[in-house]
Amino acid sequence: MSFPGTLICILSAAGITAIISSCNLPTGSYQSFQEYKKPLYGKVAERMVKYEGIARNPVIIVHGFLGAKLMDPKTKKNVWGDFRLSDEVTAFPPERSRNLAVPMTPGRALKDLKSSAVVEGLMEDAKVRVFGMNVSLPSYSSMIKILTNAGYCAENQPLPEGKHLKNLFLFGYDWRRDLPYNAALLDKFIAKKKAYLQKQYEKGYGIKNYDVQFDIIAHSMGGLLSRYYLRYGKADLPEDGSIPKPTWVGSKNVDKLLIVGTPNGGYLDTVLEMVRGMRVDSAAPMVAPAILGTWATYYQMMPPTSTRSVVYADDPTEKGVDIFDPKVWIELKWGLADPRQDKVLKVLLPKVKKASERRKIALEHLTKCLKRAKQFTDTMRVHSSPPDDVKLFLFQGDAVQTTRRASVDRKTGKLEVIDSDPGDGKVLVRSSVWDERMGMKKMVPYMISPIEWAAVYRLTAAHMGITKTEFFADNMTWCLVVTQTPSQVRKRKIYKKYYKENW
């Protein structure tokens, strides 16, 4: 037989053997290629779910951008989280637009600008009315379900039979307002929940002032907020614009931070949407650039200039546009600096009668937001190793070609997407891990990041879809319940003493 003929016979035999091996060999065989969709959970896992006590850290969910419902306290009407689909509705009505925007007040700091709309709670499900039918779109309900299945008791649900305390808390915050401001609110939230748990532990175990440590699961922008809290606690950014050194004071209350789909290195859609407007989905009206431009947090998620995410169309060097420079926004007529947005500014500033005055107020607000965003981004970029007691885990989507770079026409200000890269549809893989090689023209073989990750998990899912996967559920639970930090190891003596619960 010729050599090609012999090779074909060997390959054919090997193929048949592989098929037989994968299909007919018994379970447990060394040669079995069988795959399964779900893992099996044994008796240890069952006991783990039932466990309630001091050895299990309580969990806080920190939602992302757009992740909390907003309500008008006067009218009790929904401002965000309840949408209507109609051929006639192309924008939010005036009153709702004013509630949705953050007031632009000359001479006042961003942290002091308080909207009339208040946080109603975490958006577990978005309510949408489509052609007369009410539809509920899952948001954070899937994450809550995973955690309750793992034995956690959510504060917004009745206690299951046999359980004595709540240990899953939902931090709802105004996602439009400055992130350091919200970090201070997170500190107050943690202090309140710590006091509740210390009271419960004293009641159940006789332990006074137990050092309660929390595990935080932070999605999207919530990861930026939580990372800031870990590094700086409730401290605000310096008023002189300087970059502070991390104190890691927030880590005194946190053992583990699980970051999910967070734009640690920013994402380009922030710029695109503040120029073009944003539509969350087909059921929601368009949010005008002038409204988006009032939200301080949107600027704080822009990609650093070093990533060269925006370049001039006629610049062969692709140096990168300084998107944190107010002059750039004015020259290119972007966002609040776009004269065409005056029709929206009329709605947002009904008492200001002159277009020139409205523009002056808008440009002052734009400048404040950009200046604050630059300081925030540079602050979060400072390299600093976390304390040994803290572990940071990253869950990132790597399944969708995601906007990477845009070019801009100097004359018209028009943006055009020219490049994409793997991500979750919103956040690039390189941004979530914050690989600072993003803007480097010469590549090095190792990652450069200001964040020291304990582990990174890649999931084949989109931005919100990450939280619904079996892979996420299994590994998130493992990180929370099985993985120990040094502080938990040091507490083993306490655990042994009070191991037998007597509730």
Image (cartoon, rainbow, N blue to C red):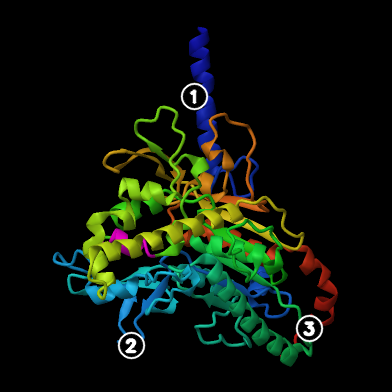
Q: Residue 401 location in percent, x, y? A: 40, 43
Residue pictured at 52% horizontal, 64% vertical: 222
Q: Is residue 388 above or below residue 198?
A: above
According to the picture, the residue beneath numbered tag 2 turns out to be 74
Badge 1 element? helix
Badge 3 element? loop
Quadrant of the rendered structure where residue 85 is?
Answer: bottom left
Mark 1 neighbour density, 10 Å: few (under 14) some (14–19) many (20 or more): few
Mark 2 neighbour density, 10 Å: few (under 14) some (14–19) many (20 or more): few
Question: Residue furthest toward the left?
Answer: 88
Q: Amino acid at mark 2?
A: Lys
- Magenta-drawn segment: 285-294
Residue pictured at 54% horizontal, 53% vertical: 264
According to the picture, the residue beneath numbered tag 3 turns out to be 500
Q: Nearer the viewer, mark 1 or mark 2?
A: 2
Q: Quadrant of the C terminus?
A: bottom right
Which numbered disc flags the more N-terminal residue, 1 or 2?
1
Q: Amino acid at mark 3?
A: Lys
Which numbered disc flags the more N-terminal residue, 3 or 1?
1
Left or right of 346: which side holds 116? Answer: right
